[in-house]
Image (cartoon, helix red, strand yellow):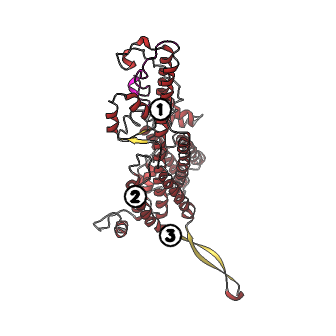
Amino acid sequence: MMKERFAKLLLGEDMSGSGKGVCTALAISNAITNLSATVFGELWRLEPLAKARKAMWTREMEWLLSVSDSIVELTPSIQELPEGGGQFEVMVPRPRTDLYMNLPALKKLDAMLLAMIDGFKGTEFWYVDRGVMVEDSGGPFPSSSSSSSCGRPSVRQEEKWWLPCPRVPPKGLSEDSRRKLQQSRDCANQILKAAMAINSDVLAEMEIPEMYLETLPKSGKSCLGEIIYRYITAEQFSPECLLDCLDLSSEHHTLEVANRIEAAIHVWKLKGQKNSTPQARSKKSWGGKVKGLVGDKEKSHTLSERANGLLQSLRLRYPGLPQTSLDMNKIQYNKDVGQSILESYSRVLESLAFNIIARIDDVIYVDDATKKSAAAESVSIFNRGTGVPIQKRISLSPFSIQNTPYASPFATPTFCSSTPVTCSPGRVQPPLNKTNLGRPEIKVEKLFSGDLEKVWTYAGNLSARKDAGDAPERD
């Protein structure tokens, strides 16, 4: 197995041996990425890894990271001559500074994530596959066995239907189990931030490839488009106001805006560098030096600074933004093996931490829905005053998407370009009739308006969470 792995690295993934393979840096980056996809690609449940997969990850990462042991730099060192003969200075090898600082930290984060995954055993929650859940929903008590226990028919109703559905006991998780889940989520979130910081620092240190610079347009206006260019060149400029005016309704649109801004930054930087070269100075006449040389250089510098500030504001508003075109070009054309190891290692740890947080959020969401559903049912039974008690199951669970005409409140949250509102003005409270109360044989007169109002109000608030952005990001 080791011979096979290193043969693929030495050949640059070109098994024909004709020399058309990728460089060593990209081969190692791809090897780390593919290994992570093999081991952690199906992290759909919070449960310990299989021993074979965990051993595979530990063994092969040790092989790939062993390359960094030979990446050194020479530093001066003072040594003593024997028998008091004096001191002399020699150059001794030590690990390169970036590897010396970041690689031990990444190994620590890796060990913490593996220990966290191994800790999810003997849990109070469990998972039900999608086919089993659909069969259960047709049973005699679909609201309690499917909707209430699962919280939502699917964690990602439309986009990620293949994910198994987490379930909790009828009364929800215990306080101790809930506290452990929250602690694991907080720890994974800190690991995510640390991995993202290392990854962004390494990408910033990588050289900008010539292939990327050659594909840039000739002007910043061509990169940004008419609207963004008009705002960014205005006398009064505010990054936050400009972002509020842009269409950032989806991740695709947001990433496209980030790519355009990043391209404009480097176009203006290149223009400023060209204006400061001796060849550019010689072409200017004496009378136009101040206006043409100083003015154009300062304008390019100002615009690049504004664009850079706009890009930083965009990244702060959407920290989970995917890699831009420049980042992918840096990874593809990077020749530094040490930087390639740090970038790929931090990237796969970032992805693993993000997936763990998403799985924990799924369980917490289901637990909240189950507890609130149980509380609503207990109120509907015991707080009716005088009269004959009615059946416990009045209607389908308020967490079921069938009870609301609105978009699914469990869909993945999308980006919002403006200040979120708590309720959409276009929504109308649905009428309380036999159709949306569930089974037609139950009389409407048996239902008390106060209890129904509570249930519908809660369902409306739950649906509004998607618009208000209160629900945690799970994708």
Q: Which residues are magenta?
A: 386-411
* Labels 3 & 1 near each other (Cβ < 8 A): no
- Give residue 53's mark: 2
> Does the magenta run of residues contain 365?
no
Say whether residue 283 is visible: no
**2 vs 1, front mark:** 1
- Circle 3: is it few (<14), some (14-19), or many (20+) Cα within 10 Å? few
* Amino acid residing under circle 1: Thr
Task: Give the amino acid type for the residue marked by disc 2 in the picture.
Answer: Arg
State the separation of the CA atoms marked 2 and 3: 25 Å
- Residue 197, image x and y in percent? 55, 51
Residue most toward the top? 445
Coordinates of residue 140 in the picture (x, y in percent): 34, 28
Q: Earlier in the sequence, mark 2 or mark 3?
A: 2
Give whichever of 198, 183 is nearer the camera: 183
284 over 443 or under it: above or below: below
Asked if residue 104 shows in the view, the reply is yes
Is residue 404 shown in magenta? yes
Residue 333, quarter of the rendered image:
bottom left
Whole-percent x, y for residue 85 in the image: 70, 87
Q: Nearer the viewer, residue 454 or 90?
A: 454
Height in image: 136 above or below 70?
Answer: above
Label ID, residue 370: 1
Could you tell me how far apart the alpha carbons at marks 3 and 1 are, in whole angstroms?
Answer: 52 Å
How crowded pointer 2 is (Cα within 10 Å; few <14, some 14-19, many 20+) is rated as few
- Classify mark 1: helix, strand or loop: helix
Q: Is residue 114 or residue 333 the one in the foreground?
A: 114
**What kind of residue is marked 3?**
Asp
Q: Between marks 2 and 1, how big is the CA–CA gap?
A: 34 Å
Residue at 58%, 35% in the rendered image: 238
Residue wearing tag 3:
69
